[in-house]
Each structure stands twice: as structure tokens, then as C-alpha cells.
Image (cartoon, rainbow, N blue to C red):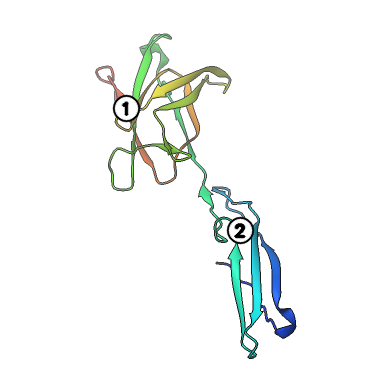
Amino acid sequence: IASFDVLSYGPEDTGDHRYVIAEVVENPDPTIEYDTDLERVTVTVSDDGAGNMSAVAGYHVDGGIFRNNTKPGSLKLTKNIVNPTMVSAEQEFTFRITFFDRQGNPAVLRQAGEEVTSLRGMIADESGSSLRQVTYTVTDGAITAILSGGETLNLTDVIPAGVNYEIEELNLPQAWKL
């Protein structure tokens, strides 16, 4: 909510008065991307000749509106193997990550207003070193990822605000559990 000191104009103030409004954030929220635009306002003060003053504000472009956005979220998925003697080093594990909207329906992922049909991520090893970049096709609000033991999938800044997700490990070997 914006607050300004009251501006008073008298007969000597007829004409145009120009102002610049900026959003000042004293305690920024790190999850918010703040609008840095400067809003220009012209206030035209007039006198009808009978001593009745009027002031009309004219805003540049968007009407003095600041548009802040929630930054996209990130997801980190690591496949840990508790008993490495039970699996081969080459064994792969498959995960389905399903994205949901606030109503629990499969989410249509959007970035900059456009529907996202693929997500890019990075696979890292146990030390955190990047191994490879991956691209996943989004189908019905979900992606399928494959990891080996000790690998981590990083999806950074790709999950829009308000989108929830569920991770399901597929094709678990018999006698294994999550």
C-alpha cells in the first residue's frame, strides 16, 4: 500500500507538476522480484476562474501500477542408496515429478506468460559436481527423470509460484521401499 504526503495546490500553482514514483522496499522478501520501473505522473492543476481548483493526475503508460512477481521455485531430488551392495553402479532409477495447480489439477507450467513444454535441469554427482545438463518434456503436467545412485537432479528457478509437485519413484525393485 502506497502512502504519500498530502499535496496542496493554490491558485498560484496552476499548470503541470511532474513527479516520479518509485517502489521503495525496506525489507525485501528474497522470493519476490520487485518492479524497478519509475512511474511518472503529471498533475495538471487548474482554476475555473471562480476560485474552484481542480487537479487531475495523468500517469505514464500503466497508470502508476507496480507489478511484483514471485520468483520461480527450485527442486532438488537426490537418489541415495542405503545399501550399495544391493545395486550395480550402472543401475538407473526412474522418477515421475507431477506438477499440480492450487486445485490439485495437473498444472500448466508457464514462464513469462508462455506455456512451458520442457524443463532444463542439471544432474550432479555426490560431490555436487555437474555431470550433465538434461531437458525433460512436460507431458500432462509431469516429467520423468532418471538418476543413478548418488546423483542429484537440480531444477533451478523453473517452478512457477503456486505450483505444487509430487515425486514418485517408478519400477522399484521387489522388496525395496521408499
Locate residue 107, reporting x and y percent. Answer: 33, 39
Asked if 68 appears above or below 129 in the picture, the reply is: below
Give the left or right position of residue 41, taking residue 116 as reference. Answer: right
Q: Can residue 6 be seen in this snapshot? A: no
Residue depicted at x 45% and y 21%: 135
Label for residue 17? none
Image quadrant assignment for residue 28: bottom right
Image quadrant assignment for residue 169: top left
Asked if 136 appears above or below 46 in the picture, the reply is: above
Locate residue 77, reporting x and y percent. Answer: 44, 29
For the residues bearing labels 1 and 2, Cβ distance under 8 angstroms:
no
Q: Nearer the viewer, mark 1 or mark 2?
A: 2
Quickly name the residue at label 1. 139
For the residue pair 168 and 84, the one nearer the viewer reads as 168
Which amino acid type corresponds to the residue marked 1 in the rendered image?
Answer: Thr
Residues packed near mark 2 inside 10 Å, few (<14), some (14 to 19) or many (20 plus): few
Q: Can residue 8 be seen in this snapshot? A: yes
Which amino acid type corresponds to the residue marked 2 in the rendered image?
Answer: His
Asked if 152 appears above or below 20 in the picture, the reply is: above
Secondary element type, mark 2: loop
Secondary element type, mark 1: loop
Residues packed near mark 1 inside 10 Å, few (<14), some (14 to 19) or many (20 plus): few
The residue furthest right is 12
Locate residue 80, reporting x and y percent. Answer: 43, 23
Task: Give me the C-alpha separation between circle 1 and circle 2.
Answer: 42 Å
Q: Quadrant of the N terminus?
A: bottom right
For the residue pair 56 and 169, the one nearer the viewer reads as 56
Quickly name the residue at label 2. 60
Asked if 128 appears above or below 16 in the picture, the reply is: above
